[in-house]
Image (spheres, rainbow, N blue to C red):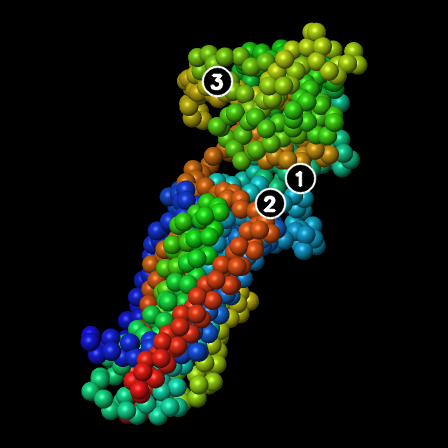
Amino acid sequence: MAVIAAVARRDLRAIWFSAFGVGCAAGFAALSGVLLVIDLRSDQARLDNWFGPLFVMVALLASLLTVRSFADEERTGSLELLLTMPVTPWQLVAGKVLGASIALSGALITTLVCPLLVMVHGSPDSGPILTGYVGLVLAGVAFVCVGVAVSAATSSFLTAASATAAVLMALWFGGVIANNLSGRLQTVLTYLSPSSHVTGFLRGTLSVADAVYFVSLAILGAFVTRAVLALRR
Amino acid sequence: MVVLAVVVGLNLVAYADNRQVDLSAANSFTLSPETVALLHQVGHPLQIVAFLTTGGPDARDASYLLNRYREVNHRISWSVVDPDANPGEAKAYGITSYSTVVLSYQGRRITAPDAQEADLSTAILRLLRGSTQQVCVMTGDGEPDLQDTGPNGLADVATVLRQNAFDATAVDLTVGTGTVPSTCAAVLEMGPQQPWSPGEVTALQGYLHKGGRLMVLTSSLSNTDPNAVLQPWGIGFEGGLVLDPARSEGVDWSNVVVQDLPSAGPVDEGVTSLQFPAPSALVVGRNSGALTVEDLAQTSSQSYVDPDPSSGTLTFSPGDVPGPAVLAAASDSSQVLNGGPGPAPGVAGPSAVHTRLFVTGCDTWMTNGFLGNLGNRRFFVNAVDWLTGQDNLVLATSQAPGSRPLPLTPALQAELLGVTVGAVPGLIVSAALGRAGWLRRRRSKRRQ
């Protein structure tokens, strides 16, 4: 556990104490504020239309934050050193995922001011706010794992970020394409799309299926990362 | 591969079971056990199209609820269509008001008045039952025509009845045997202008005594006096013209907007206001034995009844009766009849009969010109459903999330943007710059 924490701490420092990380967090907070004002134009103290786009923003943020995991390390030459240290591949993967997840959660914490402001001025239903954040954290960790897997497979900063975003958006739009299909293919594509698992969190429900989906995505991402690292060694 | 198999297996189990915890206020999206059981009976594709203004909270709530329906049974597909953006589609479905939901199943089509669980589930139950009920619409006394599409006609009523799986049949009790056909699930007397003949009165009295279901919509502008039929069931037609200065449409005090709907029963369910032009007052008796009588719609305390509208004075004057006035009422009676139809076909003996009566002192609120106003359509559908025993087919536990107003004033918008776009990112950047500055100072001290 100490090794995992050390890897996570190292990555967190690199993210939070860099202009890139600060810019991501500040930009995320600002954009969430703009989305809040757009949502409140319905003149209702409801945040489900605010949480919806946040899930997409979390996917993009995860793409950016996980670049540091492996791709940027390889670019700077520190990956070779890391791989030769007495750290098992699973400890490395867990540490990278933990570090990026904490960084992403930090960005989510900056958005807490939005529902707090709405609570001060109105009386929103707190249930969907709670489930919205639970969903964002679950989705964020899952997207981070996908990002770490992609980051492990490339040395280019740009390739890692864009490939992660592309994978996540492809999964997302699979659900849109599924609307024009029928039968089992439609069911499978719809289930694989994160968008079909976000609705529950937006309306204030916690679903076992939705939680299992995001946890599964995280587990698969971690296993793919482990496999890629094994190939590299 | 083992991990992949385990993950896929877990997802299959979770997908099939799909347990949920609803943390929303009033369990807005938890379906009742009856609805869940009903949805499991849907064995063929069921399409649900909700006509709502997309982007608004009603459309989002409808999407969430319909998604819940689909989660229970994947044979259910749904969509939300904006009738303003898709007028052709709305016209193709015969949609004339917002919040209408069209359900199609095995070649049959039915509408629900709203995208709430009770409405949707009741409509699905009707579809699964696969049968229509006959409602008999009285003619022969100058009633508006069901085919008439003009403002005083009842073509919209005919459409609403058809969309709710009712077969509307004209019945003229002034000719022939003058008896109400046994196939009538309810008799609707909407806007008679001529007095009832003795034969009609006898036919309606006999019909009610045998467990009939009667709707009477009349006013003092008509020559019909329904009291001989209504009074034994606890409702009396007082007549006159009701004026409500506090709740009226425009400057016409007789164009009453009803906002007091005191009943917790199914007829008032989902109705928040009504428009009753030139209404007359009813008198509602007390409950007695098996007879239950209930006010459904009342005017405000500032209203009054002018017993002689032809006098020309609209302001309150001596002789006027102060309100509130009852404009709509319902009566329900259950009794056991000896020598009646019997408890089962071919079996003689006592049987229970349930008589229901729905009366309004206005005979224009359901015409084409007014049916689409305020809650009139819903009120009419609820009344027919209640008369025919279709009310509350499904007990719903979910409630609509409700309105939580928060007007986005310029001041609030400035505050939100100032804090979320200005202060918070500013703090983050300031903290980072502060730390960088502190590190620089520490390094330079060490060099010294």
Q: Chain of mark 2?
A: B
Q: Answer few, some or many: residues within 10 Å of disc 2's Cα (few below 14, many 20 plus, some between 14 and 19).
A: some
Query: Measured from the top left, where is residue A116 in percent x and y?
Result: 43, 53
Give the answer, above or below, for where B228 lies relative to B277.
Answer: above
Q: Which mark is residue B159?
A: 1
Q: Nearer the viewer, residue B307 or B420?
A: B420
Q: Which mark is residue B100?
A: 2
Identify the residue position indicated by label 3 in the image. Answer: B292
Q: Answer few, some or many: residues within 10 Å of disc 1's Cα (few below 14, many 20 plus, some between 14 and 19).
A: some
The kind of residue tagged 2 is Thr
Q: Quadrant of residue B283?
A: top right
- SS of the residue under disc 1: helix
What residue sits 41% from the left and 18% below the top? B349
Which numbered disc, 3 or 1, marks the residue that appears first in the sequence?
A: 1
The kind of residue tagged 1 is Thr
Residue reaching furthest to the front = B448
Which numbered disc, 1 or 2, marks the residue that appears first in the sequence?
A: 2
Q: Which mark is residue B149?
A: none
The reply to whether residue B121 is visible in this rendering is no
Q: Quadrant of the N terminus of chain A?
A: bottom left
